[in-house]
Amino acid sequence: MPKPEDTACQINPDDLIRHQWVSVAAYFRAEASGFEPGKNLDNWLEAEIEYIEFQIQGFLQCAQEDGGMSIVSLQKLAQSIGVAHAGKFSSELELIRKIQKATRHRSCFRTLYQQPCEEPESECPWRAECQKICAVWYR
């Protein structure tokens, strides 16, 4: 007979934090629009996008202050925004492309080093990191 702790639902603390953050943000979005009927899902999805962008910006700021990205920190970022099996990836390139895909950006990181980036600067949080790598290629 299985022990109760073996059958208990395992909740990831990161998922709990994400859910709480998104639910509060979605509530404030709903409140700002006067609790307009039929907008619950839109409010939730917009809050999720906001959370993901917040996570990425925080990660990139820390990476810049720390002198670069690490696989472990990218894996944590990917996991926090919902990339499945983030821990199994061992390449920065692969992880960033998975993060781009999860955030509905073109997964183009480090693909077109001979051509200018087509992604609008305001829409790509990875642009500066990508440009650093491309600058090395041009030398």
Image (tube, helix red, strand yellow):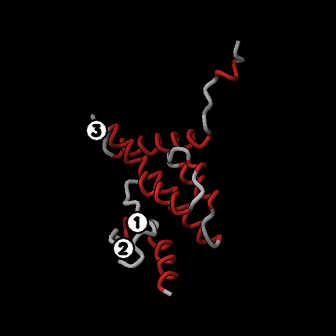
Return the residue at label 3.
Answer: 36
Q: CA distance from mark 3 to mark 2?
A: 39 Å
Q: Position of residue 65 (x, y in %)?
A: 62, 71
Taking the spot 56% from the left edge, 54% from the top edge, the residue there is: 77
Residues at discs 2 and 1 in contact (Cβ within 8 Å):
yes
Element type at marker 3? loop
* Quarter of the image where the N terminus is located: top right
Tell me which amino acid carries mark 3. Glu
Q: CA distance from mark 3 to mark 1?
A: 31 Å
Between tags 2 and 1, which lies in front?
2
Element type at marker 2? loop
Between tags 3 and 1, which lies in front?
1
Above or below, 37 against 91 in this view is above
User: Counting residues from the N terminus, which is met first, the one under dot 2 or under dot 1?
Assistant: 2
Return the residue at label 2.
Answer: 117
Return the residue at label 1.
Answer: 124
Between tags 3 and 2, which lies in front?
2
Element type at marker 1? loop
Taking the spot 72% from the left edge, 17% from the top edge, the residue there is: 3
**Viewer-proximal residue among 11 and 118:** 118
